[in-house]
Image (spheres, rainbow, N blue to C red):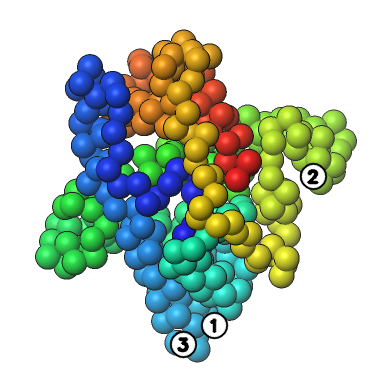
Amino acid sequence: MLAFALDITQNKPANSKESEDDELKQYMDYQRKLNHERLVHHSLDYSKNQLQENIDSSDSEKLSQFLQNFFAVSHQFADGETLMLMLRKLMNSQNSTNNWYRMNSFYHSVVFESMQQFVGVYNQMLVESPEKAKDLGASEGVEVDFEDWAYLYFPDMDFHIGKSLSYTHYPFAKRNKAIEEKWQEKIKEGKSKAEALKLIQDDYEIDDTSVKILLGQKVTPPDLELLYTSVENPIYEALTEVEDGRWGVMDGESLLDHSYYMGSHLKVWEWRKREEVEKETEMVINEMSKSSNKK
């Protein structure tokens, strides 16, 4: 099974504050209608089939255009054959029930773009062919909010730094903007792109594979390895531990509880609300990222 920031095998999450917050209750009801395993599976399968169709066409121009449109970021570090290999590795890992497979930024990019494409198709299918959508089992008849899903299940979107996000993807968009601005600042001081990025890498805890993507480097054989650990290893345990109020409103809650709490706010926010929880959201993201890095 692929290891995301949250456990995709948990389809019926609950939050202790639901009874006190109508918006949170509605948000958790929505979460309980998603089947994350099926959503990821169908996203990868759809992406692989679309790619295979274009490879089989033997039309290099058609394939090139498809890669640019479908894999806007990923095609810059991998050609069609390499992307196919990555998708097959991802699907094999997703179908494994014995191990958790940890993805690097190259794989995060491929999964992100695969899911982004499939969610659009799936949401349209819910309207035009509801029975067909039902057979896929990705949700209980509700549209998938990809922006919300990405916030919860991706540790970061560093692979997208310097490129436009088609969704708001807050607070990842803010992090990316901060990194890009600091990076450009160092470049203006006379540093090369690589030197400038090296200077800020530790400050922002940027993954080495993200650095490769940002420097325009191609994926290499070692980058294609998916590290794994047994499913018996409690890699998500830290997310369910009750906190001691380090962030005030989190007193007596877990990181998992609070990630859903913040997700509910992100989903229903008006702009006037964003400033109220902005810093708090970033702190939760940072803590979840630290937990993910320990896996």
Identify the residue under disc 1. Answer: 60
Q: Position of residue 176 (x, y in %)?
A: 59, 36
The structure residue drawn at horizontal position 48% and vertical position 13%, both measured from the top left corner, is 245
Real-space Cα separation, disc 3 to disc 2, in angstroms: 38 Å
Identify the residue under disc 2. Answer: 193
Q: Indicate the secondary structure of the residue bearing disc 1.
A: helix
Residue 34's place in the image compared with 137, above or below, is: above
Real-space Cα separation, disc 1 to disc 2, in angstroms: 32 Å
- N-term mark: 3 or 2: 3
Q: Residue furthest front?
A: 232
Q: Amino acid at mark 1?
A: Ser
- Compare residues 54 and 234 and report the one nearer the observer: 234
Disc 1 and disc 2 in contact, CB within 8 angstroms: no
Q: Amino acid at mark 2?
A: Lys
The structure residue drawn at horizontal position 50% and vertical position 38%, both measured from the top left corner, is 237
The structure residue drawn at horizontal position 18% and vertical position 52%, both measured from the top left corner, is 140
Point out the frontmost of discs 1 and 3.
Answer: 3
Q: Position of residue 247 (x, y in %)?
A: 50, 14
- Compare residues 164 and 92 and report the one nearer the observer: 92
Q: Amino acid at mark 3?
A: Asp
- N-term mark: 1 or 2: 1
Q: Quadrant of the C terminus?
A: top right
Label ID, residue 56: 3
The structure residue drawn at horizontal position 44% and vertical position 73%, both measured from the top left corner, is 48
Q: Residue furthest right?
A: 190
Q: Indicate the secondary structure of the residue bearing disc 2.
A: helix
